Image (cartoon, rainbow, N blue to C red):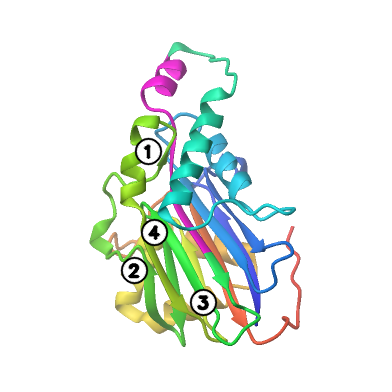
């Protein structure tokens, strides 16, 4: 099997693309046929320098060269969290204001995380396995129907202070205990969507009204500009129960194919 991957993103309304505080990356693992891995992160806007923390995590996890980040089990992830905390603490910093220094020392940085792998794409039983920390969500969709989500959340589970990857060493044990892990078998035509909290919350509410329409819309988005228009329209929705929250949004879409895609779309 082959895969087709697209990442869509939009910053908060009125902000420039460079102000986007999420992160997403992934692809086929070098020199390991049949394996691909992905990560989606949502930096906390109330934390210290979330953009840099997200960039550090993405760069360390992403498959590049002969290295592909941690295995997706508790022990490996705990060791990776610890390593990233050490790297964060060791970086030299110049604070422009005492408030920044106070936030760095007392709050640090944080990002919710979804990480997942596809394995056995070159074999008879391909599968995904994933881990989530916080409210960035993986949706496994087959024939326009949700068959699994990670973490398993409902629309009422958002809006709380979520778990995440913290820079503070004191959070390490708690972070590890809060990890949610799952896996599932893949079939040709399946979709995997990784969505940060605002998008995930909107999806869960929308599929309760018309599931087939939601997945059809997201599966057939042809271009980032179309995603931008969808986000803008849903942010202006007059019904607050249907409205998309004005937050950074990210949607990573992975389509499972029987063979190579017939078209390559390059966006700029």
Distance from the alpha carbon under mark 4 to that under mark 3: 31 Å
Q: Is residue 162 visible?
A: yes
In the rendered structure, are the residues bearing label 3 and label 1 in contact, judged by CB atoms less than 8 Å apart? Answer: no
**Percent x, y of residue 26:** 62, 59
Secondary structure at badge 3 equals strand
Above or below — where is 227 with respect to 169?
below
SS at circle 4: loop
Q: Which residue is mark 1?
A: 172
The C terminus: image quadrant: bottom right
Look at 49% across and 13% down and name the residue there: 97
Q: CA distance from mark 1 to mark 2?
A: 30 Å
| Residue 31 x/y as whole percent | 74, 64
Q: Are marks 3 and 2 in contact (CB under 8 Å)?
A: no
- Residue most extreme to the top: 98
2 or 4: mark nearer the eye? 2
**Which residue was labeled with disc 3?**
127
Name the residue carrying label 2.
204
Q: Which range of residues does the magenta coloring cover?
A: 99-116
Spatial CA span between label 2 and label 4: 11 Å
* 22 w.r.t. 218: above or below: above
Q: Looking at the rendered structure, which numbered label has been put on residue 117?
A: none
**Is 7 located above or below residue 149 in the figure?**
above
Q: Residue 93: horizontal and vertical position, in percent?
A: 57, 18
Earlier-in-chain disc, 4 versus 3: 3
Is 127 within the magenta? no
Specify few, some or many for label 3: CA neighbours under 10 Å numbering under 14, 14-19, or 20 or more.
Answer: some
Element marked by disc 2? helix
Question: Image check: 33 left or right of 135?
Answer: right
Which residue has dot 4 on it? 244
Task: Tell me which residue sits at (54%, 14%) in the image.
Answer: 96
For this orientation, the residue located farthest to the front is: 75
């Amino acid at each position: 099997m082959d895969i087709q991957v697209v990442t869509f993103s939009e910053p908060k309304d009125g902000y420039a693309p460079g102000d986007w505080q999420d992160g997403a990356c992934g692809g086929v693992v070098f020199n390991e046929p049949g394996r691909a891995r992905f990560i989606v992160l949502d930096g906390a806007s109330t934390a210290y320098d979330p953009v840099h923390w997200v960039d550090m995590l993405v760069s360390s996890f992403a498959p590049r060269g002969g290295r592909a980040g941690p295995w997706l089990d508790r022990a490996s992830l705990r060791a990776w969290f610890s390593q990233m905390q050490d790297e964060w603490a060791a970086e030299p910093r110049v604070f422009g204001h005492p408030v920044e220094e106070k936030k760095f020392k007392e709050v640090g940085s944080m990002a919710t995380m979804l990480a997942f792998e596809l394995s056995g794409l070159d074999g008879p039983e391909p599968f995904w396995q994933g881990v989530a920390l916080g409210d960035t969500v993986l949706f496994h969709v087959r024939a326009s129907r949700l068959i699994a989500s990670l973490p398993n959340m409902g629309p009422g589970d958002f809006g709380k202070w979520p778990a995440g990857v913290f820079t503070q060493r004191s959070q390490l044990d708690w972070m590890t205990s809060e990890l949610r892990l799952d896996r599932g078998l893949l079939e040709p035509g399946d979709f995997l969507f990784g969505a940060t909290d605002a998008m995930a919350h909107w999806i869960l509410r929308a599929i309760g009204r018309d599931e087939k329409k939601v997945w059809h819309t997201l599966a057939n988005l042809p271009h980032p500009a179309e995603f931008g228009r969808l986000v803008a329209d849903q942010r202006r929705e007059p019904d607050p129960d249907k409205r998309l929250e004005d937050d950074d949004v990210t949607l990573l879409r992975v389509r499972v194919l029987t063979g190579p895609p017939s078209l390559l779309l390059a966006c700029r």
